[in-house]
Amino acid sequence: MQSNKRIFGDLARMASGAISMAAGARDELEQIFQQRFERFINEKGWVNREEFEAVRALAQKAREEQMEMSARLERIEAQLAGTSLKDVNSRRNKNKPSKTVTKHAKKDGT
């Protein structure tokens, strides 16, 4: 009876050791796979989602600042020209080409 308990205890320890060894191997394989995947991504010049979102936010902020600066410049130019912003906008709208197309018939004698 005592020897059976000892055998089962040894088997349980062996199984436990095998399970922990398999878990360690799994973790190691996972790390190797992740490293190779990251190396592949870097070689291709791709970026991860966090980097993409950061650059996207910077571009959006730069665009908003550019729009604000453009509006500010128009106001300053209007002040220097002695006109109001409404006058500048109305002039800009007058200078835009109309969307209607006129056809001119060419009369050539040749």
Image (cartoon, rainbow, N blue to C red):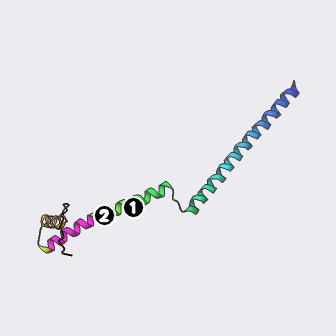
84 vs 90, nearest the viewer = 90
Location of residue 89 in the rendering, given as x and y in whole percent from the top left corner: 16, 64
Q: Can you name the residue that lies furthest to the front here?
A: 110
Say which quarter of the image contains residue 67.
bottom left
Q: Secondary structure at mark 2?
A: helix
Q: Quadrant of the C terminus?
A: bottom left
Look at the numbered discs 2 and 1 and tell me whether their residues touch, using CB distance below 8 Å: no
Residue 61 position (above or below residue 20)? below
Say which residue label 2 marks. Answer: 65
Nearer-N-terminus badge (2/1): 1
Location of residue 14 in the rendering, given as x and y in whole percent from the top left corner: 80, 37
In the image, 22: left or right of 63? right
103 vs 54, nearest the viewer = 103
Residue 4 position (above or below residue 66)? above
Q: Is residue 85 magenta?
A: no
Residue sitting at x 64%, y 52%:
33
The chief SS type of the magenta part is helix
Q: Quadrant of the N terminus?
A: top right
In the image, 56: left or right of 87? right
- Range of the magenta residues? 68-80
Amino acid on which disc 2 is placed: Glu
Location of residue 98 in the rendering, given as x and y in whole percent from the top left corner: 18, 63
Which numbered dot is residue 15?
A: none
In the image, 102: left or right of 63? left
Q: Residues within 10 Å of mark 1 (few under 14, many from 20)?
A: few
Which numbered dot is residue 58?
A: 1
Amino acid on which disc 1 is placed: Leu
Q: Secondary structure at mark 1?
A: helix
Say which quarter of the image contains residue 44.
bottom right
Residue 101 position (above or below residue 78)? above
Residue sitting at x 11%, y 70%:
83
In the image, 88: left or right of 25? left
